[in-house]
Image (tube, rainbow, N blue to C red):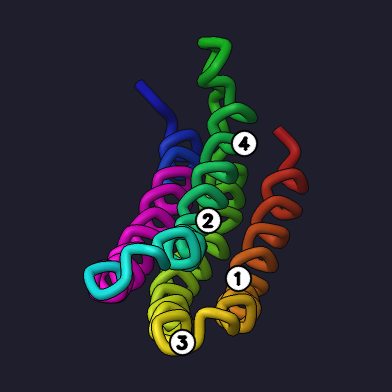
Amino acid sequence: MLSLGTSLAFAGAAFAASLAGVGSAIGVGIAGQAGAGVISEDPEKFGNVLVLQALPGTQGIYGLLIAFIIVLNIGVIDGNIKDLTTYQGLALFFAGLPIAIGGLFSGIYQGKVCAAGIYLCAKRPEETGKGIIMAAMVETYAVLALLISFIMVNGVKL
């Protein structure tokens, strides 16, 4: 049976992967809906639209990365799961929250910015790069959330 600390660490990994993944799924869906409309009118714009639709997917990758690091650190990969104290488990749980919450919201809002960029691409294809830059501004906050989660996870002494 897992200790409370180990269970909390698993919960932190689960939150990091699932909430960031939900944000990405919603964001990619929002951008995909916009993209489908543009491509139905002009299939030649598929390449530009695809780039903008894919951008919100990175938050899910960031959440998965932090979840993987947490489960790696507690010994899941090698089969020797560590018996963590409650404090260690809480620390890993809270370490997963920045990317969980940051990934959730930045994925959704990046999807909205990408949808706007897709509409920009529809009217002025030569300006697609500007749409990508605007979407990258939202990405900055997902990267910052990833960074703080990474630092926090690596700061927990097991």
Mark in the foreground, 1 or 3: 3
**Could you say which is closer to the camera, residue 6 or residue 151?**
151
**Could you say which is closer to the camera, residue 17 or residue 13?**
17
Which is more N-terminal, label 3 or label 1?
3
Q: What kind of residue is marked 1?
A: Glu
**Disc 3 designates what residue?**
120
Q: What kind of residue is marked 3?
A: Leu
**Residue 19, image x, y percentages:** 38, 58
**Disc 4 designates what residue?**
69
Rendered view: 97 above or below 31: above
Which is more N-terminal, label 4 or label 3?
4
Identify the residue at image location x=51%, y=10%.
79
Q: CA distance from mark 2 to mark 4?
A: 17 Å
Neighbour tally class for label 3: few under 14, some 14-19, many 20 plus, Cα within 10 Å: some
Rendered view: 13 above or below 68: below
Residue 63 visible? The answer is yes
Mark in the foreground, 4 or 1: 1
> Does the CB distance between marks 4 and 1 fall below 8 Å?
no
Q: CA distance from mark 2 to mark 3?
A: 22 Å
> Does the CB distance between marks 2 and 1 fall below 8 Å?
yes
**Residue 25, image x, y percentages:** 33, 59
Residue 58 disc label: 2
- What are the residue bounds of the magenta stretch? 12-38
**Disc 1 designates what residue?**
139
